[in-house]
Structures are given as structure tokens and as C-alpha cells.
């Protein structure tokens, strides 16, 4: 949230969190103003939407707003993300992109699987939580057994 690197600590330290806190306080002058501003804006957005605008997901608004602001203040980055016209692409570009994509497949599959498992694991407690909140009964679909 402050835009400074995390301090290195000895793995055998008694309380890493407390030591990190004091190390961070010692380097507070190295705080990135832009990072701190974005962090505070996101926290304020989440607070406002949680308190007064409950019908719109504040987290989504905060993420989209942070992306839009960073895009607006870094036009060079936006220019680099723009795809080249088809005429400028070469066969070598396509081969390199394809080779890179194939080598990334195992990592992407592992990431996708872990995301899938987290989403499935969260869906049941979320369903139960909403059922309790709105005083509804959580129904499970029963399929008749075939003989």
C-alpha cells in the first residue's frame, strides 16, 4: 500500500509481522505518493460503497477506477499495449507468440485449476451465508435414481 519493497527478515525471527511493521516505519519516507494515493482511494471507495451504496459492488468499482486512473496517467503504457496493425506483424512474430503460448500451458492450467477449486470452495459457504441472511432454506437439487 505504500509502494516500498518488503523488508528482508531472518526466517528464524520471533515475530516477522512486528519486525516488518517497525522496519516499514523506519523507511516511511520512501513511500510512493502515487501508490499511497491509489491505496487510500481504493479504501475510501470500498468504505463509501459498503456504507451508503450497497447495491453496487464497491470492490468492482475500486478495481475498474484504479485501472482507468492508471491508464489515464500513463499514456506510454497504454501505447505499448495497443496491438500492432496486421501488416506490421511477421511470420516470426506469430511463431514466437505461439511457442511462448505453448510453453505457458502447464502453468496456466495449474493456475486455472487452483482458481477453479477456490471458486468452488467459496460457493457453498456463500450460498449458505445468503440463505441465512435472507432467512431462506438452502435447497439441494435431488435427482431421482435410475434403477
Image (cartoon, helix red, strand yellow):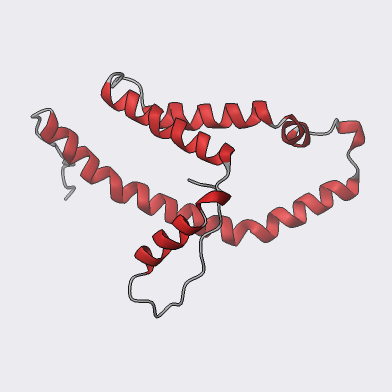
| Image quarter of residue 12 | bottom left
Residue 112 x/y as whole percent: 49, 52
Q: Nearer the viewer, residue 115 or 141?
A: 115
Task: Say left or right for 72 vs 10.
Answer: right
Residue at 27% over, 24% down: 51
Task: Say left or right for 123 vs 9.
Answer: left
Q: Nearer the viewer, residue 3 or 49?
A: 3
In this view, 55 is above or below 125: above
Residue 28 x/y as whole percent: 50, 51
In this view, 73 is above or below 116: above
In this view, 142 is above or below 60: below
Q: Nearer the viewer, residue 104 or 129?
A: 129
| Image quarter of residue 78 | top right
Residue at 28% over, 19% down: 52
Task: Say left or right for 101 vs 131.
Answer: right
Q: Nearer the viewer, residue 20 or 11?
A: 20
Residue at 16% over, 41% down: 142
Residue 97 x/y as whole percent: 77, 50
Residue at 24% over, 40% down: 126
Amino acid at each position: 500500500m505504500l509502494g516500498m519493497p518488503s523488508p528482508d527478515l531472518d526466517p528464524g525471527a520471533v515475530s516477522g509481522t512486528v519486525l516488518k511493521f517497525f522496519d516499514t516505519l523506519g523507511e516511511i519516507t520512501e513511500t510512493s505518493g502515487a501508490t499511497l494515493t491509489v491505496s487510500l482511494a481504493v479504501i475510501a471507495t470500498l468504505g463509501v460503497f459498503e456504507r451508503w451504496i450497497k447495491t453496487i459492488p464497491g470492490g468492482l468499482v475500486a478495481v475498474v477506477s484504479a485501472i482507468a486512473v492508471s491508464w489515464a496517467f500513463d499514456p506510454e503504457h497504454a501505447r505499448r499495449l495497443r496491438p500492432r496493425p496486421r501488416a506490421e506483424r511477421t511470420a516470426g512474430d506469430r511463431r514466437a507468440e505461439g511457442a511462448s503460448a505453448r510453453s505457458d500451458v502447464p502453468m496456466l492450467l495449474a493456475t486455472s485449476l487452483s482458481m477453479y477449486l477456490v471458486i468452488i470452495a467459496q460457493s457453498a459457504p456463500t450460498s449458505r451465508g445468503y440463505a441465512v441472511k435472507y432467512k431462506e432454506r438452502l435447497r439441494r437439487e435431488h435427482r431421482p435414481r435410475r434403477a
